Image (cartoon, rainbow, N blue to C red):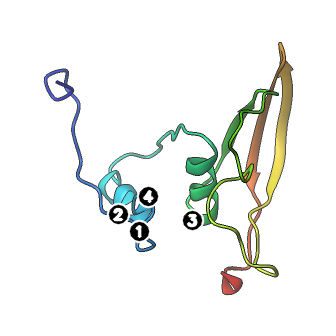
């Protein structure tokens, strides 16, 4: 049905870890685009930040906690001493009860990853 509406459907490989999709493969298939927007929750955002494929992050934080979470950031637990993604806040605003945050990932020491 989506193809009838003009959408292009791409086959994507699974990640080497066997959890989720292979971001390199996905982004390679989208290489003709200068910019893409990725929308998702904690798993998607965390995966992109850990992959080092992120230029800008626009987060909308709604101050509500839903049951069943084991981690706020999502993904597998990180090893102690590993370089964790950090964000440099560029803009912050509250709208209603939500927090809007625009940030850039700080450069990381990729030798540790």
Secondary structure at badge 3 equals: helix
Q: Nearer the viewer, residue 45 or 69?
A: 69
What residue is at 64 percent from the left and 46 percent from the top? 42
- Depth check: 21 or 32 in front? 21
Marks 2 & 1, CB-CB < 8 Å contact: yes
Residue 106, picture quadrant: bottom right
Compute the Cα span from label 2 to label 4. 6 Å
Image x and y of residue 26, in percent: 36, 56
Report which residue position mark 1 lands on: 18
Q: How crowded is mark 2: few (under 14 residues within 10 Å), some or many (20 or more)?
A: some
- Dot 3 and dot 2 residues touching (CB under 8 Å): no
- Say whether disc 2 or disc 4 marks the residue closer to the N-terminus: 2
Residue under label 4: 20
Number of residues whose C-alpha sits closer than 10 Å to that of mark 3, classed few (under 14), some (14–19) or many (20 or more): few
Instruction: Tell me the CA gap for discs 4 and 3.
Output: 13 Å
Residues at discs 2 and 4 in contact (Cβ within 8 Å): yes
Which residue position is annotated with label 3?
51
Specify few, some or many for label 1: CA neighbours under 10 Å numbering under 14, 14-19, or 20 or more.
few
Q: How far apart are marks 3 and 2 (CA)?
A: 15 Å
Query: Which callout, 3 or 1, points at the residue further toward the start of the chain?
Result: 1
Residue positioned 55% across, 60% down in the render: 53
Label 3 or label 2, whichever comes before in sequence order:
2
Q: Name the residue under label 2.
A: 14
């Amino acid at each position: 049905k989506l193809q009838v509406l003009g959408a292009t459907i791409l086959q994507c490989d699974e990640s080497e870890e066997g959890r989720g999709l292979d971001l390199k493969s996905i982004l390679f298939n989208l290489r003709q685009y200068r910019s893409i927007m990725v929308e998702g929750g904690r798993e998607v955002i965390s995966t992109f930040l850990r992959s080092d494929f992120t230029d800008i992050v626009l987060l909308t934080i709604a101050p509500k906690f839903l049951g069943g979470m084991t981690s706020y950031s999502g993904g597998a637990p990180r090893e102690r001493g590993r370089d964790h993604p950090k964000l440099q806040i560029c803009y912050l605003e509250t709208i209603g009860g939500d927090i809007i945050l625009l940030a850039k990932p700080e450069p990381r020491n990729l030798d540790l990853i």
